[in-house]
Image (tube, rainbow, N blue to C red):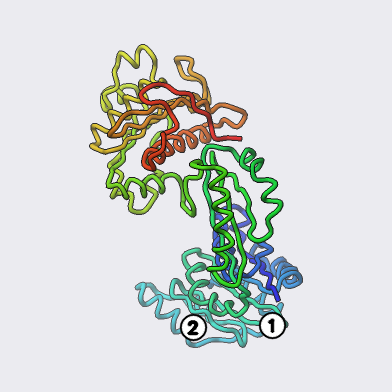
Amino acid sequence: MSHTVEILSVGTELLLGSIVNSDAQALSRELSGLGLNVLYHSVVGDNPGRLRAAVELARSRADVIVTTGGLGPTCDDLTKQTLAECFGRKLVFHPECAREIRSFFARMGREMTDNNLQQAYLPEGCRVLDNAWGTAPGCAFEADGTYVVMLPGPPAECLPMFRARAMPWLARLSEGVIRSRTLRVFGLGESAVEDKLRDRMNQLQNPTLAPYAKEGEVELRITAKAETEAEADGLIAPIEAEVRGLFGDLVYGADVSGLEQVVLDGARARGLTLGTAESCTGGLIAKRITDVPGAASVFKGGVVSYHCEVKAGALGVSQALLDEKSAVCAEVAGEMARGARKILGCDLAVAVTGVAGPDPDERGNPVGLVYTALAAPDGLWVKRLNLSGPRARRDRIRNLAANHALDMARRWLAGLAPDSERAKEAEGGGAGN
């Protein structure tokens, strides 16, 4: 029997948009890895009537229900009470849970209020899921062919509890595994990628292949279901090879977080350091790099030279050049990259200058005109980009410019041409559709 899952997230704050429902995303990934088919995500507020209706709907179309949220000590934490009622179970007091709750507060050096003991009441006959990351225990039980797992809402508790406590209980339902491999493509928009793959995607059943558009790039996810991980990987491998053969070096990585990770990994592998000089991106490239754990071993630093005085004073860009050609030109981008490499003492430096909008600059350069540059031990490359178009927003232009700069470094590190002309202006396109 193939088991189907509904994830039911409880919390009015989710409906109001106050927080993002990251629990459902994380749990879907974990459940798929068990070979369980997640068919539905639902969100309901802290209202017992609506929660009861959501539970009844879930049990009518799925045989595994995983809930998140509503297990805490406050009056609006009603998940346990409502699900116990739906499945005809009483809530019973668990002294061992009460001891763990008291111990948690003692370790934290905080006074425990009596309402916290509400968390020690769980459905009769359930399996208690101990919470080593917070106060609210979870639980799991089977009733009339439906498997129920209740987890706390805070992401720092939900995912580790699922992995350590709920996954072993659910593993008996697993019928094989589901594995995914995500290839990331930069340089073609989603419609162009889909056009190349449409016929092949329609042919595939196991594994499947699906494109997902991101800002300026495309993810291609290959998903296979099999009895073992090795068998699933064996199904994925030829499709991955086929995709790589079709798109070549536009595929910049598999199961990576982004271009910044690939650049850092490539520089680290070669023992090289990296720096940045940014104008219109305002430090975005440096932020993306330093968001990656371990970036300090590679990244020396960055200069946000938003004003021409800083381009000249800090990076050594020629004032005569700035006066003659403006800050938005190939020569300035090149001098920014060279200057960053010199003052930061790094092996590679990327630079960006351009007009992110919403209006043309004071010299009449249009919105979307951007130059990126790469200074390396063996030379300088500059790329001209036209990132204008119907979807040309300020944030999109900045993100695309950052992607192009990082891709230049990625290509150089991989021994590829940096997709630009050496030491002079070159035409370059955006990565949109």
Label 2, label 1: how many angstroms apart (C-alpha)?
23 Å
In the picture, the quarter occupied by the N terminus is: bottom right
Q: Which residue is mark 1?
A: 143
- Residue lying at 38% horizontally and 29% vertically, measured from the top left: 373
Q: Looking at this view, is 275 or 8 the one in front?
A: 275
Residue 250 x, y percent position in the rendering: 51, 41
Q: Residue 69: in sight, yes or no? A: no
Q: Residue 416: in sight, yes or no? A: yes
Q: Which residue is mark 2?
A: 97
Relative to residue 316, is residue 210 drawn left or right?
A: right
207 versus 380 height, above or below: below
Cβ atoms at labels 2 and 1 below 8 Å apart: no
Q: Looking at this view, is 369 or 313 the one in front?
A: 369
Quadrant of residue 38 in the image? bottom right
Residue 233 x, y percent position in the rendering: 54, 63
Label 2 residue SS: helix
34 versus 17 height, above or below: below
Q: Looking at this view, is 238 or 372 the one in front?
A: 238
- Residue lying at 25% horizontally and 36% vertically, measured from the top left: 344
Three-letter amino acid code of the residue under disc 1: Ala
Count of numbered tags: 2
- Residue lying at 52% horizontally and 23% vertically, measured from the top left: 367
Residue 432 x, y percent position in the rendering: 58, 35
Residue 430 x, y percent position in the rendering: 53, 31
Relative to residue 160, is residue 238 drawn left or right?
A: right
93 versus 207 height, above or below: below
